Image (spheres, rainbow, N blue to C red):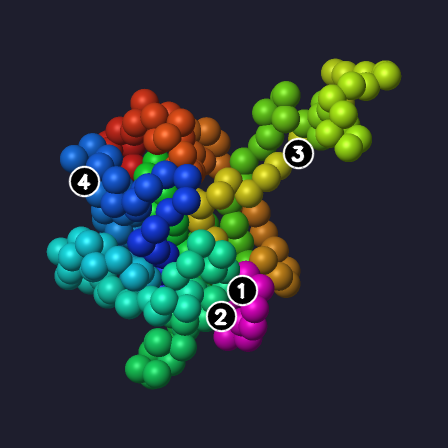
Amino acid sequence: MKYFCLIPARKNSTRLKNKNVINFFNKPLIYWTIKIASKCMYFDKILVSSDNYDIKKITNKFNNVEFLKRPKSISGKNTKMENVLKHAIDHLKKRNLNYDASVILQPTSPLRKLKTIEKCCKLFLSNKYDVLTTIISLDFKSHPERTINFKNNDFRIKKFNYSYSSKKKIYKLDGGVIFIRKIKNFKNKILSGKSRFYKINYPEAIDIDNIFDLKQAKLFFNVNDLY
């Protein structure tokens, strides 16, 4: 199976300004994802999709990584990842470059480990799945059975039952560590078809979306843990 890696990184960000190029241990944040992707033994091609000239300059420092200029039409805050992936697939097809699957690595997960990427790629090689993504378990207080539901924003409740008895584990998408998607028949949904999930743990699952996430990632980051 031939993989191409897609690293999506648009210029503007809503909650944390310019987060993809924010300084993270003396390097732009996206640098760490490009570097770890370039070390993965499974990737036949690496594309960085962006509308940011600064990201292009960062990408050009890596010999085995291609910068893909993203058009304005798919560079807005409401752009779906499906559209970004479709643009990358079309770009490769125009150059007669054929791949079986795409591995999407968000630049906002700097604690992602090389061994995690390679384990996921190896697991996907079985050809049994259409999509694979990493997940993380919800903590005790976030369990659905312990949520508080109000009506019409009236923050009062007559009866409140806070259950401690459930042992059922609940998981959520981690937000940015790994997505693997077969692309031969890709249409408009990344998470569709036969799916497989791979559990990772905190802090590897940290996805930087705001200043609090950034501070957490800095507390746990150790470059020696990545490779």
Residue shown at 63%/63% (left/top)? Answer: 193
Give the amino acid at mark 3. Ile
4 and 1 marks in contact (CB < 8 Å): no
* Residue denoted by label 3: 170
- On the picture, is 2 further left or further right than 168? left
* Residue denoted by label 4: 27
Give the amino acid at mark 1. Asn
* Residue denoted by label 2: 183
Can you give x and y, in whole percent of width and height, for residue 123 in the image? 49, 53
Stretch of the chain drawn in magenta: 180-190
Q: Secondary structure at mark 4?
A: strand
Circle 2 crowding by C-alpha within 10 Å: few under 14, some 14–19, many from 20: some
Q: Secondary structure at mark 2?
A: loop
Residue 186 lies in the magenta stretch: yes
Can you give x and y, in whole percent of width and height, for residue 158 in the image? 86, 16
Q: Earlier in the sequence, mark 2 or mark 1?
A: 1
Q: Please tell me whether mark 4 or mark 1 is closer to you in this view.
A: 4
* Residue denoted by label 1: 127
2 and 3 marks in contact (CB < 8 Å): no
Can you give x and y, in whole percent of width and height, for residue 87 in the image? 41, 71
Quadrant containing the C terminus is top left
- On the picture, is 56 further left or further right than 42? left
Disc 2 versus disc 3: distance between alpha carbons?
Answer: 29 Å
